[in-house]
Amino acid sequence: MKKFGIVLSIILLAGVLAACGNDASGSTDALNEDKIVVGVTAGPHEQIVEAAADVAAENGLEVELKVFSDYVLPNTALSEGDLDVNSYQHEPFLDQFNEDHGTSLVPVGKTILNPMGVYSETYESIDDIPNGATFGLPNDPTNGGRALFILEESGIITLEEDKKETASIHDVVDNPKNLEFIELDAAQIPNQLSEVDAAAINTNFALGAGISPKEDSILLESTNSPYINYIVVRAENENDPVVKKFVEAYQSDEVKAFIEEEFQGSVIPSWDE
């Protein structure tokens, strides 16, 4: 009986400690107010957060960067608590990730638009693409849908009315040029551009391959795009002071000037839009 009492006491103590570590809603403790761990994808997002880190340091906030090479891991790491925030994704991608993984990640501040471009090694205008041309699309649902949305905006195709921002190739209802859509890994499309007549390429992959969206694209996404990127956090940390401090550093005049000078219109600061 004495042994049972000791075990019961330990269990009760563990319960008390657990209750002290969480509020009534079940959310975790607030983040450290002096340091924040930020996940980014390599390329422009990494460079811009480095600039934001310099601004944050002037205000007493240390920013630790963790750099990823794909689009899924930064959200996985955030949801599992390995990151405090991440900065790399647009809202349609975030919504799809939450739906697919049962997570509660939320946007807390606009960052940039990486305008997706259409490129070709053969044709100099989107209007020059011939009937029956092959067209490369990213094979992930959100960026594939984004590419189709851009083509519809330009009048090349027509999509199902209720699938404008979430379309797949199966939602194309009018394709006057009979384009043959080929779904490819987004990161590999720059290397495969010579194998198709034209292709849609994400800005970070274009820049990584030495391709300038502003100078080399034959069609560029408009600035009224729904695919603006965001700083994202776990729902329980949405109002943490350190998150607000990081957002303010990112959305500073210094960072805006860095983006405009460094990327010359290939990446667009979007928090004032």
Image: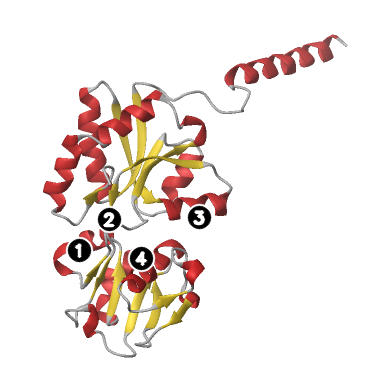
Q: Position of residue 186 (x, y in %)?
A: 35, 65
Circles 1 and 2: CB distance less than 8 Å? Answer: yes
Q: In the image, what residue occupies the spot 30% across and 62% down?
A: 202
Label ID, residue 186: 4
Task: Say above or below: 182 vs 141.
Answer: below
Q: Quadrant of the N terminus?
A: top right
Q: The residue tagged with tag 3: helix, strand or loop?
A: helix
Circles 3 and 1: CB distance less than 8 Å? Answer: no
- Identify the amino acid type marked 3: Gln
Instruction: Mark yes or no: residue 119 visible.
Output: yes
Q: Crowdedness of circle 1 by 10 Å Cα count: few (<14), some, many (20+)?
A: many
Point out the tag, 4 or 2, that comes first from the N-terminus. 2
Q: The residue tagged with tag 4: helix, strand or loop?
A: helix
Q: Which residue is mark 2?
A: 114
- Identify the amino acid type marked 1: Pro
Q: Which residue is mark 1?
A: 213
The answer to whether 96 appears left or right of 219 in the picture is right
The answer to whether 122 appears left or right of 45 in the picture is left
CA separation, marks 3 and 1?
Answer: 26 Å
Label ID, residue 149: none
Dot in front, 3 or 4? 3
CA separation, marks 4 and 1?
Answer: 15 Å
Q: Position of residue 185 (x, y in %)?
A: 38, 68
Q: Which residue is mark 3?
A: 96
CA separation, marks 4 and 2?
Answer: 14 Å
Point out the tag, 4 or 1, that comes first from the N-terminus. 4
CA separation, marks 2 and 3?
Answer: 19 Å
Q: In the image, what residue occupies the spot 45% across and 36% down?
A: 82
Dot in front, 4 or 2? 2
